[in-house]
Amino acid sequence: MYEVQAIASFDHHGSRKVGDRFTVGSQRQAEELEKKGLVQVLGSAPEMGSTAASTEADSGTVGRTGSGTAEGSTSGSTTPTPGELLVGGNAPDVITSLAGLQDKAVLQSALDAEKAGKDRKTVVEALEAALKAD
């Protein structure tokens, strides 16, 4: 079990709002939600009956992918925005991940990041359509 915190509003076994903390069943689920820019992985949830959580879980490093710094960053403190994380994958995966995402701020951030980066026509069109949807 992995503990995560929502950084965008979405549906995952119920409605999740920004700031909600919840657990997911596997590291893979936690990483997929994080990759889509929906959650921040907090770490491995302590097992029932466990005497103490691991040091990695306490530091919040379990299940994290990458260093958390933007390429070319000199300060080491720049972390990708949820929108940047959302458009980080291949086009079909990005478009699939938009299903059910209703947070307009994340969608706009993703659109801005996509236009500033890869600028893929299909991804831009899907993001613009998602922003127009009610």
Image: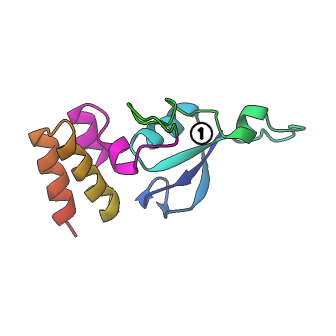
Counting from the top left corner in percent of width and height, residue 131 is at: 21, 62
Counting from the top left corner in percent of width and height, residue 32 is at: 44, 37
Q: Mark 1: which secondary structure?
A: loop
Counting from the top left corner in percent of width and height, residue 41 is at: 57, 43
In the rendered image, which quarter contains the C terminus? bottom left
Measuring 41% from the left and 47% from the top, which residue is drawn there? 37
Q: How is the image coloured?
A: rainbow
Going by the image, does 9 lie left or right of 96? right
Q: Which amino acid type is shown beneath numbered disc 1? A: Gly
Measuring 50% from the left and 63% from the top, which residue is drawn there? 18
Comparing 13 with 70, the one in front is 70
Comparing 92 with 123, the one in front is 123
In the rendered image, which quarter contains the N terminus? top right
Q: Which residues are magenta?
A: 77-98
Counting from the top left corner in percent of width and height, residue 133 is at: 19, 65
Q: Would you identify the image quadrant in which residue 107 lies?
A: bottom left
Comparing 74 with 27, the one in front is 74
Tell me: residue 103, above or below residue 52. Answer: below
Name the residue carrying label 1.
25
Tell me: residue 28, above or below residue 98. Answer: above
